Amino acid sequence: MGDVSYFLIFIGIIINFAVAAWVFYLFFIKKNVGIELSPLHRLCSTVVLIVLLLIAGVGVYMLGSQINDILRAVAYLSISIVVLIVFKWAVALMRAVEDRSVKILEMLVGVIEVGDFNLDGHSLHVHNLTMLLYDYLPYNLKIKINSHNLKYASLLLDIGKLGISRKILNKSGKLEENEWEYMKKHPEIGVSILKTAGTFDCIYDWVKYHHERVDGRGYYKLKGEQIPLASRMIAVADTYSAITMSRSYKPSYSYYDAIDELKLVSGTQLDDELVRIFADIPPKKVESCMEDVKRKMQFYDEEKFRVN
């Protein structure tokens, strides 16, 4: 029975250390949009972490002593499994709240854009395309991105346009130089808006630099990997969306025309590797992103959430 007892206790120790590590990562390392721990919450998280380490320490003590009979081993493993189940339930609840927050934001962005010919779901389209691109990233790139934060950044990329005159946004002809300089301020205006909420600091740069070019000729002159990976992803999605959506100053283009355009500016305006990944995504999946947007925008329009 000794070997079985040792094994059960060892599994319990592994579970408790794993949960402790995950708690430390979630509440002390990982930064999620919309989640800002108060001193009280941080204190509670610290207490939970200490309790988990103490439980793991009890297991280590049991292994190093003669207190390792089968009944105690089963009891210890049972407690560890309960800890794991409670933790997984708490994480699932937290993720459900996060997903609902994204859905609410998505709805608000859609309501703002419905009826505006030059927006009309553009942000939702960029969001869908960005998250689709994320799904196809190789593992070495995917681990660099917090997907939850990417959802927010790709929805809020153009929030700064709320601070731009409608005369400029809806102008059918080419913008004058002074108008273009004003338009280029929308990423910075967007960051200023986000700063008022206080919990978006981890995506400020992603939103601010989504118009940067990899050749260094963008709004803020960042070059290559100086530009955050998330911003480079949003730039690919934003460019594709801009090409395929109708605007007051241009018609829409097909999927294949847009892919050709992306390839033409690959390595100068857009990240070469990300363009290759995006171009390899099945066309039906890319086009379904717009179909989803059209359904949502039709609903917002029919429900008259916005009065023009």
Image (cartoon, rainbow, N blue to C red):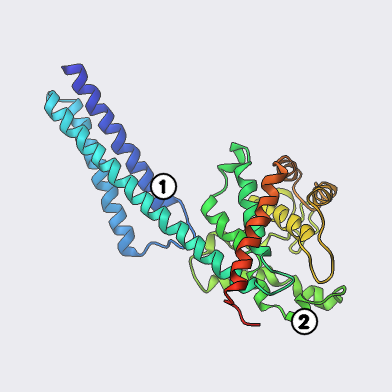
Residue at coordinates 51% horizontally, 62% vertically from top-left? 103
Q: Do we see residue 283 in this rendering?
A: yes
Quadrant location, the C terminus? bottom right
Quadrant location, the N terminus? top left
Residue at coordinates 77% horizontally, 58% vertically from top-left? 244
Residue at coordinates 19% horizontally, 25% vertically from top-left? 64
Q: Is residue 161 depicted above or below 294 in this figure? A: below
Q: Is residue 178 depicted above or below 220 in this figure? A: below
Residue at coordinates 38% horizontally, 44% vertically from top-left? 22
Judging by the rendered image, the residue that carries numbered circle 2 is 167
Q: Is residue 274 depicted above or below 296 in this figure? A: above
**Label 1 packing within 10 angstroms: few (<14), some (14-19), many (20+):** few
Q: Amino acid at mark 1?
A: Tyr
Percent coordinates x, y for residue 52 in the rendering: 26, 43
Percent coordinates x, y for residue 50 in the rendering: 26, 47
* Left or right of 306 in this view: 217: right
User: In which quadrant of the rendered view does residue 245 lie?
Assistant: bottom right
State the residue in front, 53 or 101: 101
Judging by the rendered image, the residue that carries numbered circle 1 is 25
**Label 2 packing within 10 angstroms: few (<14), some (14-19), many (20+):** few
Q: Amino acid at mark 2?
A: Lys
Secondary structure beneath label 1: helix
Percent coordinates x, y for residue 206 in the rendering: 62, 58
Q: Nearer the viewer, mark 2 or mark 1?
A: 2
Q: Do we see residue 227 in this rendering?
A: no
